[in-house]
Image: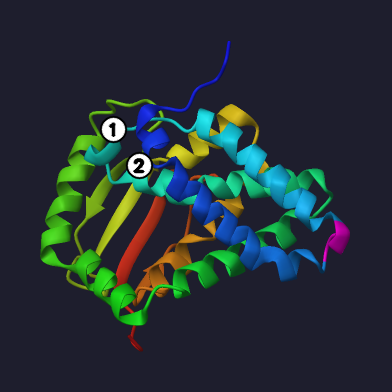
Amino acid sequence: MVETVHPFYENHRSAMEAAMRHRLDLAEAMLGEHVQPSSIDGIKREVMDEFGIVLTQMPYVGGTDSRMSDFFMRLLGFMAISRVLRRHGVSLSVIGDIERETYKAQLLAVPEAERLASGQHFLSPENQAFLREQAEKSRQEQFPEDFVYDFVEPGPGDDFEFGINYKACGFCKFAARHGDKDILPNICGLDFDAYATRGIHLERTQTLAGGASHCDFRFSRLRSA
């Protein structure tokens, strides 16, 4: 049977592929420290081919009705990078470093004012209301491969603005289904820069990928932002 890409992701395919090519260009210098420079072009082509496979594996979780669709579209491509580099003998820790540095560089390519405005919106009362609604919807578990999470209100002694406890993780489900569990922590490691570049401090002490009962995300404003 020929594997196909869900129509929702097919509609966003060109943008996702452009983002992947940009990441690979940003990663080129670091790649050159760990593989033969003459093999880099071939590795980049291999990653794009693997990304085509990831696209067919990407689970549909509601499209524009779910905030987690964007997470899948932005981050599952790193699974393709990890798979290919692992096949070329690059260690998991080095793969993690390459992915974090290239993702951070990609995020910082967005103008600072735009990034900080995005962060302010994320922490806004309006977005918190949206997140409460999305959390409630997630607990209906309409899509088996989706995330399930609770919105966390700060208590009297807490210094965070709000939190999210992820009880089930779409990335963990994806990794378990497709044999990527060993590279999953590298995906988790991208979260801190994703928020810091928008002026948000993320505190997290445990993850589902690390064997905990839930991922405890706690958000506050970066003091320097």
36 is higher (above) or lower (below) than 167: below
In the rendered image, the quadrant that contains the N terminus is: top right
Where is residue 49? Give x, y as percent. Answer: 66, 38
Q: Amino acid at mark 1?
A: Gly
Q: Amino acid at mark 2?
A: Ser
Lower sequence index among marks 2 and 1: 1
The residue at which mark 2 appears reads as: 69
Farthest-out residue, top: 1
Q: CA distance from mark 2 to mark 1?
A: 7 Å
Q: Is residue 214 visible?
A: no
Q: Are marks 2 and 1 in contact (CB under 8 Å)?
A: yes
Where is residue 6? Give x, y as percent. Answer: 41, 27
The residue at which mark 1 appears reads as: 62
Name the side, left or right, on which 147 lies relative to 134: right
Q: Residue at x 30, y 54 (%)?
A: 164
Most foreground residue, 195 or 218 = 195
Residue 147, quarter of the rendered image: top left
Q: Residues within 10 Å of mark 1 (few under 14, many from 20)?
A: some
